[in-house]
Image (tube, rainbow, N blue to C red):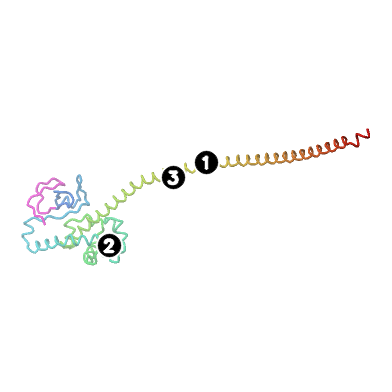
Amino acid sequence: MLKHSSIPCNGCNTLDIGNACYECQMCPNYNLCLRCFNNRKQTLNHLSSHPMLPIESPSTVNSNPLAKQHIDQMDRLGSTYLSSMLSKLSTNDDGMKLTPPSTRTLDKFSIDELYEYLLRLDPNLKSLAEKLKSERVTGADLVNFNEDDYNKCSITYGEKKKLQFLVEQKQLKVNSQSVVSTSTVSESTPMQNEITNLKEIIKKQEQEIQGKNSAIQQLEDIVEKQDQQTRLQEAIINQLQESLEKQTEEMRVLIELVQQHRSIVLSPSNSSDK
């Protein structure tokens, strides 16, 4: 853990923070005094949801070797414990999703909801959960806890570190979910516009196809009428041909009769009689 002798506070611009100092894990060279930390001070790019770690002064640590050893152990185990805590924020031991914690912030939890949430999150937090419940601590109270509140609830340094990790990471998780949700909505809007445009294009194409089908139907009707007229003309032509053939046959018969009559008239017997 980092040690300091005199570090300015980026929240209230105090030049000498003193022994109580908190360092932001997301903003470079950003520190807050105890008062600004408890008030969840926000400035420029720094948000109250950013994880903060306490920076112990040399006098505080060196004056108590056991405290120094405990702090070093917490530093080594901090990342491991934080990873396991974060993994349980979304699932329990059976792999089932914990709906209330994943969709609500800690400041919305009642006394009983906070108690049940801590037990589901880590069974080892039962003693801590019972302390908070006995003091009637709600989620909103926990978010705004200060050193006096921790002392009043008889919360140890290790338990305090766990609660601070929990509060900060829970806020980060909810904020990230809201950002993802907002980006999803913003990304879905252009997609919806594209779908609407495609629907309009398809509708226009369907109308054009219907118009073409109507024109084709009209052409088919015209062709059918022309076919009927053609068939009628062919029938008339056939009738004319049959009539012509009959007339030709009658003419042939008449010619034969005339020739026969002429032959009879010009025969020798008829000439001698004359």
Q: Residues within 10 Å of mark 3 (few under 14, many from 20)?
A: few
Query: x and y percent of residue 11 in the render?
Result: 16, 47
Farthest residue to the top: give it.
Answer: 274
Q: Which residue is mark 2?
A: 117
Is residue 199 rendered magenta in the image? no
Q: Secondary structure at mark 3?
A: helix
Between the residue at mark 1 and the residue at mark 2, the CA separation in whole angstroms equals: 67 Å
Closer to the camera: disc 1 or disc 3?
1
Note whether 253 is above or below 71 in the view shown. Answer: above
**Number of dots carrying numbers:** 3
Closer to the camera: disc 1 or disc 2?
1
Q: Which residue is mark 3?
A: 199
Is residue 9 rendered magenta in the image? yes
Between the residue at mark 1 and the residue at mark 3, the CA separation in whole angstroms equals: 20 Å
Q: Which residue is mark 1?
A: 212
Q: Residues within 10 Å of mark 1 (few under 14, many from 20)?
A: few
Between the residue at mark 2 and the residue at mark 3, the CA separation in whole angstroms equals: 47 Å
Residue at 45% across / 44% down in the picture? 202
Does residue 195 appear to the left or right of 268 in the view shown? Answer: left
Region in magenta: 1-21
Judge by depth and name the residue closer to the eye, 248 or 101. 248
Which comes sooner in the sequence, label 1 or label 2? 2
Per the picture, the main secondary structure of the magenta-coloured stretch is loop
* Amino acid carrying mark 3 in the image: Lys
Q: Secondary structure at mark 1?
A: helix
Does residue 235 appear to the left or right of 79 in the view shown? Answer: right
Q: Which quadrant of the structure image shows residue 71?
A: bottom left
Which comes sooner in the sequence, label 2 or label 3? 2
* Amino acid carrying mark 1 in the image: Lys
Residue at 20% across / 58% down in the picture? 165
Quadrant showing the N terminus: bottom left
